[in-house]
Amino acid sequence: MVLIIISGIWYGVSRKTTTPTIKEPIKIGAILPLSGPVSIFGNWIKEGIDLALKDINTNRIKVIYEDSKLDAKEGVSAFNKLVDVDGAKIIITAMSLVTVPLIPIAEEKI
């Protein structure tokens, strides 16, 4: 009986635990007004995201930036590219002029 318990403990201690590895980085799309009338806000957000990525220091997250130019049509095109071509599963947007038209599209696609 004691031998069975000791061998069970030994098995549990000696077993290798493998951590799952992520082969591809997590892709996050960011649709920001990087040019146009409110580009200062879009660039502030971009700098904040870049600073956060630098702070966590990981290669497991990739942010793909697209310029909405504060135009809804540009935002929809950027969204479709990020989801269909780049494979982003998370989308960050700024400015309601671009974000609001994307809501029904995002609900359908993601």
Image: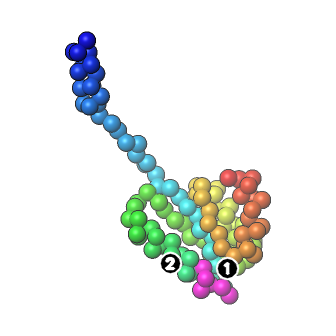
17 relative to 66, above or below? above
Judging from the image, the colouring scheme is rainbow
Residue 28 screen position, x and y as percent: 55, 61
Q: Relative to 102, say whether 37 is above or below.
A: below
Position of residue 13 relative to residue 46, above or below, is above
- Specify whether 44 is left or right of 11: right
Q: Which residue is mark 2?
A: 47
**Which amino acid is tagged 1?**
Lys
Q: Is residue 28 magenta?
A: no
Q: Does residue 54 appear left or right of residue 28 in this picture?
A: left
Asked if the residue under mark 2 is in contact with the one under mark 1, i.e. CB atoms within 8 Å, the reply is: no
Q: Secondary structure at mark 2?
A: helix
User: Which disc number belongs to residue 69?
Assistant: 1
| Residue 37, position as x, y percentages in the image | 68, 87
Image point 67% across, 64% down: which residue?
79
Viewer-side residue, 70 vs 48? 48
Instruction: Name the residue furthest front.
Output: 2
Q: Position of residue 29 (x, y in %)?
A: 58, 64
Could you tell me how many numbered marks the image carries?
2
Q: Residue at x 43, y 57 (%)?
A: 60
State the image quarter where residue 75 is shown.
bottom right
Q: Nearer the viewer, mark 1 or mark 2?
A: 2
The magenta stretch is 37-42
Real-space Cα separation, disc 1 to disc 2, in angstroms? 17 Å
Q: Three-letter amino acid code at disc 2?
A: Glu
